[in-house]
Structure formats: structure tokens, C-alpha cells
Amino acid sequence: MNKIARIHVNQHVIKANAKNGENNPIFTVKQGGKNTYAFNVKVKGEMELVYSPDKPLSCGAKVWIETRGDIELDKSSDTKLDKSSDTKGYFNPHVNVKLPSLSSAKMDRKFKEFLRNKSKIIQNKNKLSAWLAS
């Protein structure tokens, strides 16, 4: 019997794709301590939709699909794959999937953007605290 797999949609990736004009995979399949990312996921067998707001996954997901069935992943950004494509296959939790790496310039830009956003949040909290104290 297969280990339980949990499949969920990464909302932050959807938003980042729209904001940055990128096309990163939005589904995460968690199984056996491994995460695999895909554009499309096909489950062969029974599955259950789970909503657990009081006990989310370690990544923060509160809604996901659980299955012990076989999983077929499409890890290509082209959703019109033909059957012979080698980027499509059954999920194997023991196979490491290489994800595209960001260039250091792109990573620096994303990190600076992250810091700017965090700084704005902190400034707004400080302004609110000062206003509430007065």
C-alpha cells in the first residue's frame, strides 16, 4: 500500500506568478517527508478533501487532498504535453526533483522586495502602536 500523499495548492505561488509574470508550479505533493511540485496532478484511486483549520500542515495549508492512490504529475509548464513526454510520470517519493534555481540577481531582488514589505509592515505597526498609546 502506498504511503499517504497530501496535495495542496500554493496560493502564494499563484499570486507571485501573477505579480511577477512567472509560471512556477502551484501544486505541492507531500509524501514520505518529500515535497514535489507540479502544474497538474492526476490521482488514480480514492482521495479525500480535508479541511483542517485548527491543525494545518507544517507549511500552513488548511485544505488539501489526501490519497494512497497512484499519482501522476505534470512538472512541465506546458500543459499540452504529449503522452511520450518524459516530464510526466508516476510519483516516486524517492526521486529528487530538481527545481529551477533563481539567479543571484533575481534572488537579491526578491529578498530586497521581501525586506521592503516587512519594513512597511513594521512601520505600520509602530504607527498604530504610537496612535493607540496617545
Image (spheres, helix red, strand yellow):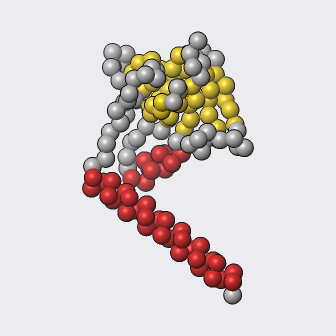
Viewer-closest of 81 and 14: 14
Looking at the image, the residue that sits furthest to the top is 1
Q: Is residue 127 above or below residue 89?
A: below
Q: Which residue occupies the extreme front position in the image?
A: 33
Residue 103 left/right relative to 89: left
The residue located at (44%, 33%) in the rendering is: 37
Asked if residue 81 shows in the view, the reply is no
Give 62 or 76, whichever is nearer the viewer: 62
User: From the viewer's perspective, is 126 left or right of 23?
Assistant: right
Q: Which residue is located at x 27 percent, y 49 percent? A: 103
Q: Quadrant of residue 109?
A: bottom left
Q: Judge whether residue 42 can be spotted in this image.
A: yes
Residue 7 place in picture, x, y as percent = 56, 31
Q: Residue at x 58, y 12 (%)?
A: 1
Q: Position of residue 92 (x, y in %)?
A: 45, 20
Q: Image point 56% across, 16% down: which residue? A: 2
User: Eyeballing the image, is 131 above or below 18?
Assistant: below
Residue 99 spot, x, y in % from top left:
35, 36
